[in-house]
Amino acid sequence: MIKIGIVGGTGYTGVELLRLLASHSNARVDVITSRSEAGMCVADMYPNLRGHYSYLFFSEPEVTKLAACDVVFFATPHGVAHALANELLEAGTRVIDLSADFRLQNADEWASWYGQPHGAPELLGEAVYGLPEVAREKIKTARLVAVPGCYPTAVQLGLIPLFERGLVETQGIIADCKSGVSGAGRGANVGSLFCEAGESMKAYAVGKHRHHPEITQGLTAAAGQAVGLTFVPHLIPMIRGIHATLYVRLTSENQKLTDAELQQVFEERYKNEPCVDMMPWNSCPETRSVRGANVCRIGLHRPQGSDLLIVLAVIDNLVKGASGQAVQNMNIMFGQDELEGLRFAGLMP
Amino acid sequence: MIKIGIVGGTGYTGVELLRLLASHSNARVDVITSRSEAGMCVADMYPNLRGHYSYLFFSEPEVTKLAACDVVFFATPHGVAHALANELLEAGTRVIDLSADFRLQNADEWASWYGQPHGAPELLGEAVYGLPEVAREKIKTARLVAVPGCYPTAVQLGLIPLFERGLVETQGIIADCKSGVSGAGRGANVGSLFCEAGESMKAYAVGKHRHHPEITQGLTAAAGQAVGLTFVPHLIPMIRGIHATLYVRLTSENQKLTDAELQQVFEERYKNEPCVDMMPWNSCPETRSVRGANVCRIGLHRPQGSDLLIVLAVIDNLVKGASGQAVQNMNIMFGQDELEGLRFAGLMP
Amino acid sequence: MIKIGIVGGTGYTGVELLRLLASHSNARVDVITSRSEAGMCVADMYPNLRGHYSYLFFSEPEVTKLAACDVVFFATPHGVAHALANELLEAGTRVIDLSADFRLQNADEWASWYGQPHGAPELLGEAVYGLPEVAREKIKTARLVAVPGCYPTAVQLGLIPLFERGLVETQGIIADCKSGVSGAGRGANVGSLFCEAGESMKAYAVGKHRHHPEITQGLTAAAGQAVGLTFVPHLIPMIRGIHATLYVRLTSENQKLTDAELQQVFEERYKNEPCVDMMPWNSCPETRSVRGANVCRIGLHRPQGSDLLIVLAVIDNLVKGASGQAVQNMNIMFGQDELEGLRFAGLMP
Amino acid sequence: MIKIGIVGGTGYTGVELLRLLASHSNARVDVITSRSEAGMCVADMYPNLRGHYSYLFFSEPEVTKLAACDVVFFATPHGVAHALANELLEAGTRVIDLSADFRLQNADEWASWYGQPHGAPELLGEAVYGLPEVAREKIKTARLVAVPGCYPTAVQLGLIPLFERGLVETQGIIADCKSGVSGAGRGANVGSLFCEAGESMKAYAVGKHRHHPEITQGLTAAAGQAVGLTFVPHLIPMIRGIHATLYVRLTSENQKLTDAELQQVFEERYKNEPCVDMMPWNSCPETRSVRGANVCRIGLHRPQGSDLLIVLAVIDNLVKGASGQAVQNMNIMFGQDELEGLRFAGLMP
């Protein structure tokens, strides 16, 4: 039985971790910390968990209690994992960080995007970027895993098969992405109010979103050369879901590829991936088809047989885009069945 | 391994059955019928099921194939189970009917509310009304179970502890109920369009809803005498969820009961019920706390200590109000753990 | 041209006042105050107003500027109008208060519900409760008008025809009310987040809502005797709209009234009311039919011809339930056409 | 007083025409036809119109009655205006067609996209494409106006300032567009159900949408040369609103243009346009800011000063994208103030 600690469990990724782990046959949450809610039963904050965690109360963060766990998840704002990770690792506890603290490999780049110095640059060398479809082997033995962001998960899974094989131009990539409101977290911000975000949509942070360097880093690694990307996120009036609409151009020597061959590239790449679902050519995946599920569903389009390939990729931002992927990483790290706790079929309608 | 057939699996209760049964460790759907979609893989209609039912295709309804199953679920409009149930029962196949065909014990009453003659009155004698909290023992050996309607489940679970003990007046009961739009099914009706039902609400079928006699029948049985009920359903702009706000008056001899004693009546009644969750006194259950979960969550209120008791009961109309309750019945009928396939914690947010 | 000041214009009732007054041919907003947003153009906060108020900037609240207006609207939390009203009235400026400060005629009752002493009890004598359908004559000459709350508007308009004529029991009234989320205002509260209030519903403040004494006061005045009411508000996942489902019992001597006679009571009562729309008997008004409109739409039901009469009343909580009713009051006070600025037909779909 | 007829008034563009025309001081709807609803008062179908059109009933379509009007709007599926327009024009009645019948100037192209022969190719010569920002002079004297589609309105208004001045590449244009569900009309299709379109999003008709040739036609005219466009529409869970995210590349000689100069191009182009609102550089317009309003609101972005310009354009698909634009055309055709009936400020929240 894997002993689990969660730091900062009051937000949406925290409750989603609890929901998923409730159905994990070989893991148990022993500690969950929250400074503001210490003493409260988790089910009092999240009544969907009533009957599942009657023993579990939020507690003040204490390193010694956390260090007694096999693994600690950080479901915190950035900066917190920087401060605590090292101490836990030294105590032999593995760390799965859902925040952005260890996603960028370059501490200076991190500092420039997050507006503060990197708090633990000495750990960057061993931090593994936890996209299982790319780094499964490294994850197995990792002590410190950085769970990818929601947008980066969808965009990278949608594009790496093409970049790994050098099929598309590395410049001029467009990622027009749409996210449900839960991506903004449970913070009490006016912009996330029902009456502000409902019955409306908008772009935001155009050219300035912090997931931009994370996406670029991943695609650059896949391509083996620098990529140039325009990333425009949009806020959509739904609770869960990310829809990435990705526009890439086939290189001139690859424009002769048939639709079937392009489809085959993806199917081959993901044939052994339990959490990526290639739909048939010309499919339009719906975000609700992955609601609650740890799946990235992908469809390919090439209008009028031009050199422009359109990749549509959907995930649940709280599952494959956060907590589900975190559990998937844990399963890999601890030699579990990779899908344990993650077999939920998606809630539709 | 229980062999399952589903008749009419293209609607919302059908896909919900499939979702729930996908996580059942001791049951397998062998046959699913749909005249209109025969030949289509179920996952092509419901992409959330991709990866879970690759072997399963809609087929033309054929009694011989269905009769080879251990149990057949009817997820059909009313009238279909009337026509087919007997043949299946004679073949030794048990039947769990999610439609209204066998919910009313009086064939004439059924005929008057549904506008057509009852098609199988000879089966009414053995049909068991499948509310496990009331009829668990009968369900164990039942050959034919009528799964309660969504409103009737919420209203009965909210009120039977009071009526069974004669604590409240049997006349003047008010059930002001609110339902998400999925209660109207997947039929292409103008009233269920996103642009008609969204951002709005209304009452409907005031005093004329077909669940009225079903509720009355159940409460009358609990009370041991005729009850008089006003039932006003409302359509709410959400996909899933029923919220019943129930107003009953304590009889004069019971007005001295304290709040704690009233709470105790419910906790006692449901202490061994795995699918009913009594919240603390004065709680206001949210429908989302049971989204996807086979739970009825209940809160009690008594403003100003008057003789009026207010019971708030929420369910997911597609789960405890339909498909989940159907699976719960199956588990009871076949000696399974009653919660097998039904442990999902509720998707929140 | 009526010169208007608005105190506290950053909330939803503030922007709604601006929207409505933009189409008023004989009024002009000269001053709008907000401490937090002083210096900002109103259209920068509310882009829907771009092109309508390019001249108007939020300013620090200054009594001298406000006192130069013919009328000042308070769109503020409770307590603010208490502090400022007297000074404005002495300067000859009339006051229309959208907050709760002057709705209750009894200062002690106000203090007990709002948890602080009443700040201006000396003004209660002249404050007019601004429900035009009840107090039009008094409003004409009023210096200080208290605009009714949203729930109280819907409930009173739905019930006063019955109480004024003594047709129903004054005890045991049930008001099961449902409100869109904008009723909670634009404050950044977790409970009003899209991901908390969306796709869910719940009751709240059962027996404890501050609109309870306001409703009781109005109904008591209509009945000429004390009334006993149970009021249960619910939060519905829509932006605008209130739906009141009202249950009252005909007195024994009035149970012989026919449905047509009851309908006639309402039609007679409201035949000259431009902002109340009686629908035909057995109608179920939808909240969207009044979205953006200054109308209360009412339908009557009497299931099975019993003694229980059900009144359904819908309003837009921000219009007839707040800012529209405030403008209606202004029109009456200043001798304008009562519908000026209020002819909008409702946005549907 | 302009005498108006409406053919096919039961859909969303029909009710929206009625809503807008209700506030028009110099126009009156005399005839509205619907085969299926003949005899019904329009307010019985659309209760938001109660009190505004008590005199108006749906009638069987009769050319003689329609021909007695000054202008007839077609709010019909494609093909209907083809069949009736000529007869009306010959009778001296002007025609404003909200359908796609006269939008494409090439009858063969129309036939290939709509799968049937063009029914009135002889009228194409005089049909004016009713985008006032492009064709105001022609509209003044037009007998037959084709109201642009919703997506084409947003995309063209977002891009024509650039193409008219040759600032951007004419190939490789990407229009990633998002639409609320009302764009699909009031037809009872499963895909438009609340439970299908709610809490989810998807792309659809990738590379195959009928608005594609209409957009291309308009941009080609603006550019003076053929343009190459990729158009990907998405369905968003909101009732009203279109958000176009447009990606174009500055030609090499224009990459030196500063952000301010690009902003100036748009402001100059639209300075006299009452229904286009240029927001400040780097603005992200929200669809709700134009809800119910006849405005296209535009924001410009150029991330990292690259050659890629991003134009964000929002409209209400039922107003500036359909019925509002139709009324704007009527006003121009009949010498009215162009904004008459169209001054509504947008419903927000």
Image: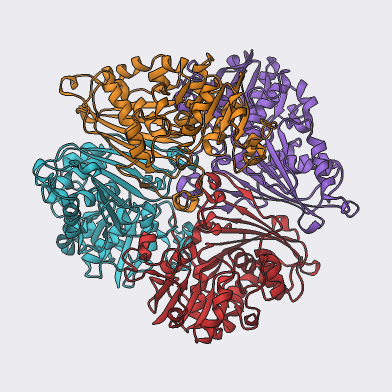
Chain colours: A cyan, B red, C purple, D orange
The percent coordinates of residue C248 (x first, y second) are 78, 51
Tally of numbered discs: 0
Q: Is residue D107 above or below residue A188?
A: above
The percent coordinates of residue D292 (x first, y second) are 51, 31
Tell me if A62 is positioned left or right of D337 in this view: left
The percent coordinates of residue C227 (x first, y second) are 80, 47
| Residue C46 seen in this snapshot | no
Q: Dividing the picture into quarters, in which one does residue A5 lie?
A: bottom left
Tell me if C199 is positioned left or right of D172 in this view: right
- What's the residue at 40%, 19% (across, down)? D133
Q: Dividing the picture into quarters, in which one does residue C96 lie?
A: top right
- What's the residue at 58%, 68% (across, down)? B78
Q: Is residue D334 above or below residue D205?
A: above
Viewer-proximal residue among D266 and B111: B111
Viewer-proximal residue among A243 and C221: A243
| Residue C88 seen in this snapshot | yes
Quarter of the image with the N terminus of chain D in it? top right
- What's the residue at 51%, 21% (across, down)? D330
Q: Residue furthest right?
A: C253
The percent coordinates of residue A145 (x first, y second) are 21, 56
Q: Is residue A93 above or below residue D62?
A: below
Q: Dividing the picture into quarters, in which one does residue C81 lie?
A: top right
Viewer-proximal residue among B308 and B282: B308
